[in-house]
Amino acid sequence: MNSNGVPIRVTYAVQPLRTRPAITSNANVDKDLRAWRELDVSGARPDSDVLTIALGPDSSLLVAGLGTYTGSSTYPLSLFGVTSLRIITADGERSYSGGEVIKAFVERSRRLYVLEER
């Protein structure tokens, strides 16, 4: 979730690519999934790839959809699929790998976990 007033770049590795990335405005992030616009990643390898997305101000990026995730620290990382994540802003960058990735997301509602860049 980019709450910055400027664009950011998000690079993440997936293994496998289970969820197609999608974008919506921050105002629509809690809405139905129909508010999200799927991105064309037809060139990505479905078994394992690295995706880089330019994310505009006040926009959110969907990187994973997990119908069974409840915030448990024992959730199998193999089901999450995102093995690393890097956010680059005008002020610097943040990187997460392995188990750090899923822990970086915080519960916003019962069915939504976000990593917010301010």
Image: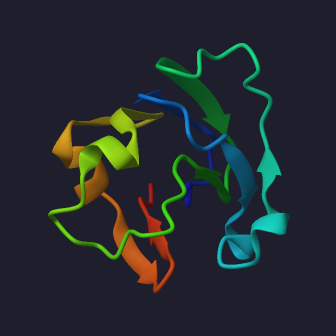
Does residue 92 appear in the picture of this structure?
no
Left or right placement of residue 70 versus residue 89 in this view: left
Specify the color scheme.
rainbow
Most extreme residue toward the bottom is: 110
Q: Is residue 108 above or below residue 69?
A: below
Question: Nearest the camera: 67 or 8?
Answer: 67
The image shows residue 106 at horizontal and vertical percentages of 34, 70
The image shows residue 69 at horizontal and vertical percentages of 38, 69
Q: Is residue 22 above or below residue 53?
A: below
Q: Is residue 34 above or below residue 15?
A: below
Q: Quadrant of residue 9?
A: top right
The image shows residue 23 at horizontal and vertical percentages of 72, 50
Viewport quadrant of the N terminus: bottom right
Left or right placement of residue 6 versus residue 114 in this view: right
The image shows residue 60 at horizontal and vertical percentages of 63, 56
Going 72% across and 13% down the picture, which residue do you hit?
43
Going 20% across and 37% down the picture, which residue do you hit?
98
Viewport quadrant of the C terminus: bottom left
Question: Nearest the camera: 32 or 5?
Answer: 32
Q: Quadrant of residue 20?
A: top right
Going 24% across and 52% down the picture, which residue do you hit?
76
Count all numbered tags in the image, as a single digit.
0
Going 60% across and 44% down the picture, which residue do you hit?
19
Does residue 95 appear in the picture of this structure?
yes
Left or right placement of residue 25 versus residue 117 in this view: right
